[in-house]
Image (cartoon, rainbow, N blue to C red):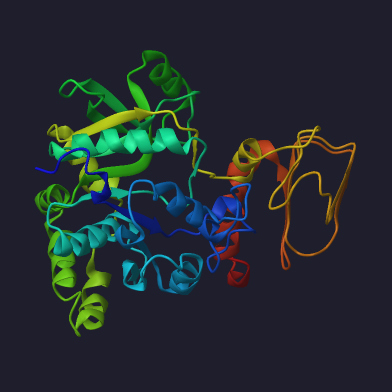
Amino acid sequence: MRMSDNQGGLYAVIPAGGSGTRLWPLSRAGHPKFLHPLTGTDASLLQATVDRLLPMTETDHIFVVTGVAHAAAVARQLTAVPEENILVEPSPRDSCAAIALAAAVIARREPEAIMGAFAADHLIANGEHFIDVIRQAMNGAEQGLLMTLGITPTRPETGYGYVQCGNPVGDGPVLAVEEFKEKPSYEVAESYVKSGNYLWNAGMFVWRVDVFLNELARQQPQLHAGIARIAQAWDSPTREDVLGEVWPTLPRISVDYAVMEGAAAVGRVGTVPGDFGWNDVGDFHTLGEVLAADQSGNVVVGQDPSAGVGVMLRESENLVVVPTSGRLVAALGVRDLIIVDTPDAVLVCPRDRAQEVKSIVDELKETGRLSYI
């Protein structure tokens, strides 16, 4: 078995899909949120994710799974990652197929490799603690557990799923995961946080690829068989043909539903609680909470709030302003608003309704105004 201090052995997989509809009109299908610099620096969310993982791994151990439309942009942003490590899925099949493809490709190189899966569009404030938690999760993975990184809840959040923790596994910080819980009502979320037995499900995983693929075969035999066929052809001239034939037949299902829930039910999932300033940047209100604000609580995304270039705010408080059109954005005597100005669409909404922006995208789809999506 691999020694736990051999930390160069982590293969990092970054699924980079989804268009971030709650961040419309900044995030679009053709230029989704992970390609944008929403980190408070010039780095995109994707670039920040890679930089954060480099203390644990090397660039040739980093894989990105992304769609056809984004592969070129991903390669441009990640020049240090080998081009063959950018795995292109012909169409979106949800997270399980994407993660399983990466696991199968890595298993061809190193059958018992430890792999971590990390979303391309999360912010993490404390990178050092994040690395410590991954190291602890790797120890659990070496023991044959499918590890999920749990976040110590800071509030009764209804927008996240939860994991229910059981007893410690061994003498380290690893806890057994008894069950994955759906997004709860406020009252249920409150009881979760009070009990101290629940963590937020951050959708980040660490496991040995052979353990994961075996569990996939047990629970999702059709998906496993399809991925195995694709992986077998991966380094051959028939890769594109096999991928094109098999990929559309794969079930569209998340890795939580497909593998993790069933594995937890038979005692094969562990977690390590983390508190490293995690944020999934799901909407503009959240973005406003994590980026630097001026004295009036206003956040201008993508530039220093004191610069004042392209934005004029007078007697206004707690605004989130995203100026990307080149026009001047001026606000007078307003508060608690989101203002997003892009070349072809403008969004104005109260911060406390930020989650509902997705409904605008849904309506644009229903009415056929696809050029705005």
Quarter-wise, where is residue 265 in the image? top left
In the visual, does 280 lie left or right of 289?
A: left
| Residue 23 to residue 202: above or below | below
In the visual, does 200 lie left or right of 101?
A: right
- Report whether residue 251 is seen: no
Residue 188 coordinates in the image, percent (x, y) = 41, 22
In the visual, does 96 lie left or right of 310?
A: left
Q: Residue at x 61, y 49 (%)?
A: 357
Q: Residue at x 45, y 27 (%)?
A: 185
Quarter-wise, where is residue 150 in the image? top left
In the visual, does 351 lie left or right of 89?
A: right
Q: Nearer the viewer, residue 32 or 222?
A: 32
Residue 48 coordinates in the image, percent (x, y) = 50, 51
| Residue 37 to residue 271: above or below | below
| Residue 31 to residue 190: above or below | below
Q: Nearer the viewer, residue 318 or 114?
A: 114
Q: Residue at x 17, y 63 (%)?
A: 109
Q: Residue at x 32, y 19 (%)?
A: 197
| Residue 196 to residue 1: above or below | above
- Report whether residue 219 is seen: yes
